[in-house]
Amino acid sequence: MTSDPGGAPATTQEERPVAAATPLRKRFGVKGFLLLGAAVIALDVLAAILVPPFPKGGAPGQACDYPACFINSVIEFPPPAVVLDLSPATAPAVAPMVYFHPSISSTILTMWIVMALVLLLAFLATRRMRQKPGRVQNAVEWAYEFGSDFAVGIGGEGARRYYPIFAAFFLFILFSNWSGLVPPVGRIEQLRAPTSDVNITIGLALTSFVLFQGEGFRRLGLRGYLGKFFPIGEFRHGIGAGILAMYVGIIELFLEFVKPVTLSMRLFGNIYGGEVALAVISALTLAIVPVALLGLEALLNLIQALIFSVLTLMFILLAVEGHESEEHRPAAAGGVSVDHPAPRSADNHQPVAA
């Protein structure tokens, strides 16, 4: 704590985030959340009156039976809608389960919008960085330091260098998840939450896979990294030890290829399942119930973004960690090895003099 020439104590850098965060909490407290909930309810009521549900493939104003038609009219099926077909002549008449066709889907378009929004917010938050920070800079620095300390807390000091990757995955996935909760995303065919499409989540998982595999090869080298899965050197300790080590290493190798599958399917399943549940509840109940479910879904979306980014960070740290055999520590003063304590006498359990 320092004082200015007038005698008033100056705010330290550690206290600035608290001072900056307090007005935000006061400005957007319980009243703000109530107003936000009232706005969502009013928007749902107006939408039901002005644009009532109609059967899929039908025309607006067409009769829609409750409840089956109400549910089917708001549920999006896993394949995303095609916004722009780049090759209409080669489009398959009946889409197979897995196929390649150049087109821009609704999830890709929404993903580009989310990316532009994240980059714009990052630019606006960091364009006027000063030695004497203001409230916005204080909030940004506090968020960065909080996230960095969180990464170090779960992964050790070595996680600090990989924090930008952790933060990039977290922010992008979080905004992608939350985009599905904001109209008109999910209400019109051209916009849909990116992470509710399995193609997007597989792409994110493969990006994570390339990152931690590449970092493992870069830090340990080709021989050191492959030695984690093919520990041939263990045969020096016997044939049994070598076979067991190779068996464990091959299992770990197969698990490496399971990681992107679990990353992608976990994220897709939770986000798509949450959207289906929210759509069904919105179609069958009054607007007040979906508002409560909307808050729960926002929290779950944050947790899913955190899980994906934390797992990516931990996979990177595991990839750069060698599996070589532990070496004996150097001998302590007096010539006695630390790993092998000095012999003790049988009667008094005291060390025998050398």
Image: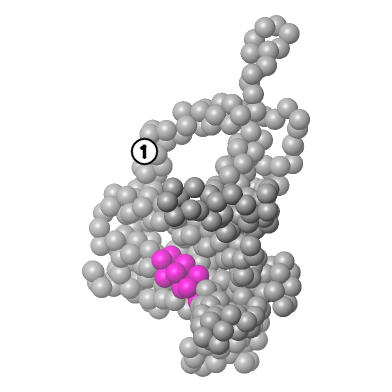
Left or right placement of residue 35 versus residue 104 in this view? left
Residue at x-position 29% and y-position 49%: 288
Left or right placement of residue 233 versus residue 97 in this view? right
Please tell me which residue lies in front, 142 or 130: 142
Expressed as whole percent of the image width and height from the top left, the position of residue 242 reads 56, 84
Q: Is residue 146 above or below residue 151?
A: above
Residue at x-position 61% and y-position 66%: 326
Please tell me which residue lies in front, 206 or 258: 258
Q: Which residue is mark 1?
A: 34
Expressed as whole percent of the image width and height from the top left, the position of residue 29 reads 42, 33
Left or right placement of residue 226 versus residue 300 in this view? right
> Does the magenta portion include 270?
yes
> Does the magenta portion include 124?
no
Residue at x-position 33% and y-position 73%: 72
Q: Could you tell me what secondary structure mostly forms the magenta stretch? A: helix
Task: Answer with the quarter of the image where residue 7 lies.
Answer: top right
Q: Is residue 39 above or below residue 72?
A: above
Kind of residue at badge 1: Leu
User: Magenta residues, as a range?
Assistant: 261-272
